[in-house]
Each structure stands twice: as C-alpha cells, then as structure tokens.
Image: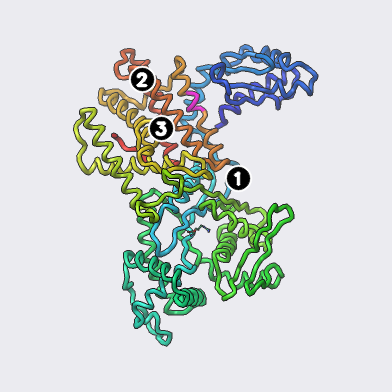
Amino acid sequence: MKQLLDLLSEESSAAFERAGFDASLGRVGISNRPDLCEYQCNGAMAGAKKYGKKPIDIANAVAEELKGTEVFSSVEAVMPGFLNLNVKEEYLADYIRGMAGAERFGVEAPEKPLKIVIDYGGANVAKPLHVGHLRPAIIGESIKRIARYAGHEVVGDVHLGDWGMPMGQVITEMQERYPNLNYFDETYTGEYPEQPFFTIADLEEIYPTASGKCKSDEDYKKKCLKATLELQQGRRGYRALWRQILDVSKVDLKRNYGNLGVEFELWMGESDADPLIADMIRDMTDKGQAYVSEGALVVDIREESDKKELPPCIVRKSDGSYNYQTTDIATILFREREIKPDLIIYITDKRQELHFTQVFRAAKKCGIARETTALEFLGNGTINGADGHPFKTRDGGVPRLEFMLKEIEDKMYERLRENEESRGEEAMPEEEARQTAKITALAALKYGDLSNQIAKDYIYDVERFTASEGDTGPYLLYTMARIKSILRKYRESGKDADAAEFPVPEGRLQKAICQDLALFGRMVDEAFRERAPHKVCAYLYQMANDLNSFYHETKILAETDEKKQAGYIALIRTVLAVMEACIGILGFEAPEHM
Ligand code: ARG
C-alpha cells in the first residue's frame, strides 16, 4: 500500500505541475507546527529561485489548484510561502480501512528484499550472560523483527564465543583438577564418555577461577595459551572435552535467551569458521595481503582518508593461534559461501568499533566480502548505574542477566498487587499474577532499553522502567489492557466488536488517533532504514497518549447511540491491533489483564 505521505505528495505535486511548476516541488511532510496544520509543503520556497518568483506567489497559485481536492480539507498559503495542509476526515478513514484490511497493515515487501544476517548474540561459552549481553540481544532481536516486517529475508546468528582463550582456560583448570581423566591423556585412543562430568554450575565457577589465576600466575597463563592453541590445532581429547563444554553451555544460554524472548535461527560460533581459516590465511599470504610483522601475521588496513593511524588487523598471533579478528573474518567468508547476504549487521558494545573496522576493511581488501555485501556495525551504548558508571551489582560485580530479570519481575509483581489493592479489585490467582509479572517485566526492560537511541548510554533504573505512567513499557501495556477490557465488556453485552466499521473521525482527539494510525507504514520504513527501534517506541508512546486522551473524554461503553459506539469500538480495536504489531517488532507481548 502506498504511504499516506506519498499519496498526499502526489496530490500536491500534480497541483504544482498544473500551476506550471516542477512536480518535484510538491513533497508533503508532517507539519512542524501541529498547532497550525497537520501537513505542510515547502516546495514554493525551494522553487522561488528557479522561477524567479516570490514564494508566496507560487504557494498561492498551487493552493488555487488544490481547491476542491478530494484529499485536503483545507489548503492555505502562508507567508513567506508555506502551504499548510489538513487532510479530509473521509479520506483518512478510507485510508485506514484499507490498512486494516491489508496484510501487515499495508507494509509491502520491497521489490528486491535484502538477504540479511544479523549477528547479535555474542554470548561466550562457559560464561553466564551478563549485563553486557543485554543490549545486543534486545536490540538485535528487534532489528531482526523490524527488518522482517519491512519484508526482508533475515536470519539471526548468535555467533558464540567458543574458540578463544576462555576455552583454553576452562580446559586448563579442569586438567589441573582432574589430571587423570582420559581427555588429558595424549596416548589415549578410545572413546570419551557420553555424559559430561560437569554441570553448568561447575563451568560458572571454573571459568572465573581460571581467568583470575591467569592474572596473577604467568605459568598458569602460559598453560592456558598452550591449551588454546592445542585445541585449535585439533588435540583429540581437548576437542572432545570442548564439545561437551559447548553442549552444556548452549542448553543454559538457550534457556536464558528464551527468557528474554530472543531467538536465533543460527547457533553458530567462532569455531564454525575454523575449518576455513588455514586456506584463508594461505590465500591472504600468497596474494601478499597479509605479511609477518613482529612474528604475527597482519593485514594493513590503513586508508588515506584516516584521521588517525589504525593498527593492522592481526590474523595470526605470534604463537600461531588465531584470535577474535581471524574468526570474524573467516565467519564472513563462511557467510559469503553459505548465505550470500546483501547485508551483515553486527550489534555489540560500541567499544568494539575498532575491531569491526579492522575486520571489515581486511575482509574487503582481501576480497573475502564481495563488493556488494554491506558490512555494518551498530555499536550500542553502555548500561549505567545511577552514578553514571557502568552498572554493577552491590558488591561491585558484573550483574548477571538472570538476576536483573528476576529483580524487575519481582518489582512488577509487587506493583501489580499494589494496584489491585488500591483499585479495590479481586486479587489475581497467584500463578496468573506471576505470569503477568513476567510478561510485563520483559516489556519494562525491553522498552526501557529500546526507547533509547542505540549508541547512547542510559541509566538502568528499575523504578522508572516499571512505572505505570510516563514513557515506559508498562504504560503501553496498561493502555492495551484498557482497550482489551472495553472490547471484552462490549462483547459481553452481546455485540460484535469485529463487525464495527472504522468511523470517519470526529473532533480533534479522534483525528489525532487516525493520523497516528495512518503513519504506521512510514514509521516501519524509517525504523528499518535508520536501524532505529526507538522510533517504534516513540510511535507507540504517541499513540498511547492520544488513545488515553480520547478515552478520558469519551464515554465509550455508556454511549447510547449504537452507531457512534460501534465507531469508537472500531477505532480502539484498530489501535490495539497496530500496537500489538509494534510491540511484536520490539520483541515483547501484552497480558490480557494488568
Ligand atoms: N563474544 C563477543 C564478546 O563477548 C561478541 C561477539 C560479537 N559478534 C562478533 N561477530 N564478533 O565480546
């Protein structure tokens, strides 16, 4: 379906043409003076020079041409040459009826959908998800859903950290503790046990222990580096043990991502690119793209336009092992071979920007990424505590995602019970209350995050995120629950809420809601093109505010004029459906009651 602003622009462009001016001047945008008009066109200002006329004369001539249009209810040329436009209520209603009857509210797939890989998990094997993994997961999931809604073909890849030093550290620590196990016996040629001898809880203790020891004990660190190298080079016992570490860890990660409403189509890791690395490195060396510098193999990625000197990309360390850069470049090779994407979007902390600049440049320079493959890094800002520094637990540790989620859930539960009491309502059964708290907590957390621009830092504030008033997830969900409750009561009175026809809006409040609805397609388009989930949030917030203003001034269920009432019902039903679509692309849900 064509977007509303395009239709309005067509109408205005035709008028420019009839008046003897270039049609391209007719572009209509949303008014930046909503107190004066709904839409505006500034083409007369741009045309003044070209035609050697005063802008107001052009605007007047166009306004004359727009008289009697089916689209605008008022057209006004104002000094120094703006066209102030209002749209006809009937036209708006027709447009929304069209939207409501169309798939995805009229958002059409582009002629050539893009094939997109979104790399957004970044979890590391043997390490629990923590606060640092929260934003990439939430943002990535939302961008994936937005891109899909906009009609593109998208897969999400968790890209597990499963091939670096942490693996060597865990293996080393296990070897220190249980040196007699078969995994560590290099002469052993038999099978290894099917069941791992450790649990996720063991891993969660082993990794930090090993990593701590590395900091104070040089010999131990050397052992870890050696184990990492031997693992990468294929030492049989290490590979078998590593496979089990991976399996145990994945179960836990899947559960945790699941609790966040985050799902990956691909559960690949750094290690999956390993089989490609040897040939890739040989190729780079043969072509002279990589060379030895201080014992390491590097690719020079400097470009003339660089303002400061960028360090080379290290593709093999001096001890012969591969690093984060190697696996990321090889993963691009893998994706080019297996998926052939038009675009790969990476979402991680913005402090990784240099890494990605190096990787992207090396991949392009060495012909690993095709020229047509766009590589894009979206660096997210930090989650800060009230002190403005990265958010920490009370004892200064790195907060685990599970516990953050639990805290917010408990808070939502508390609020729910308080609300029931203050409204004098019957208490929800315990299980339902817990379930509701879970759903609303996720909305509070995700909305609290996504309503910020991706690159900006924000303050993690459970009180604010869970508040039922203001620009928060719970506020939206309350609005939706309110609509659901009205629709339920309407149905209970024996009427058919789905049969009600979308009304021609009456009055300012209804019209505002209609304007919001009609701009849905434009919002989706912008949110995708600008990779901006916060635009979905802003859209939702505006919609909820407009809906609530209308609700407070209108007696919907008490309305005695049935036709009028049916119109109200259709209006709020459509708002609910569009809000559902929006929270769907943000990656959360709404409960029935709140
Ligand atoms: N595992 C990495 C980390 O914890 C993030 C991975 C991001 N994706 C990538 N392709 N490098 O920092």
Does the magenta portion include 89? Answer: no
**Three-letter code for the amino acid on which mark 2 is drawn:** His
- Label 3 vs label 2, nearer the camera: 2
Q: Badge 2, how many Cα within 10 Å: few under 14, some, many 20+?
A: few
Q: Residue at x 65, y 26 (%)?
A: 27
- The mark that comes first in sequence, 3 or 2, is 2
Q: Position of residue 436 (x, y in %)?
A: 29, 40
- The mark that comes first in sequence, 1 or 2, is 1
Relative to 353, 259 lies left or right: left
Q: Main secondary structure of the magenta part?
A: helix
Secondary structure beneath dot 1 equals loop
> To which residue does mark 2 refer?
552
> To which residue does mark 3 refer?
577
Looking at the figure, which quarter contains the C terminus? top left
Write down the region rendered in magenta. 514-518
Q: Position of residue 561 (x, y in %)?
A: 33, 13
User: Which residue is at the front of the view, 468 or 295?
Assistant: 295
Secondary structure beneath dot 2 equals helix
- Mark 3 near ligand 1 (CB under 8 Å)? no
Q: Position of residue 487 (x, y in %)?
A: 32, 27
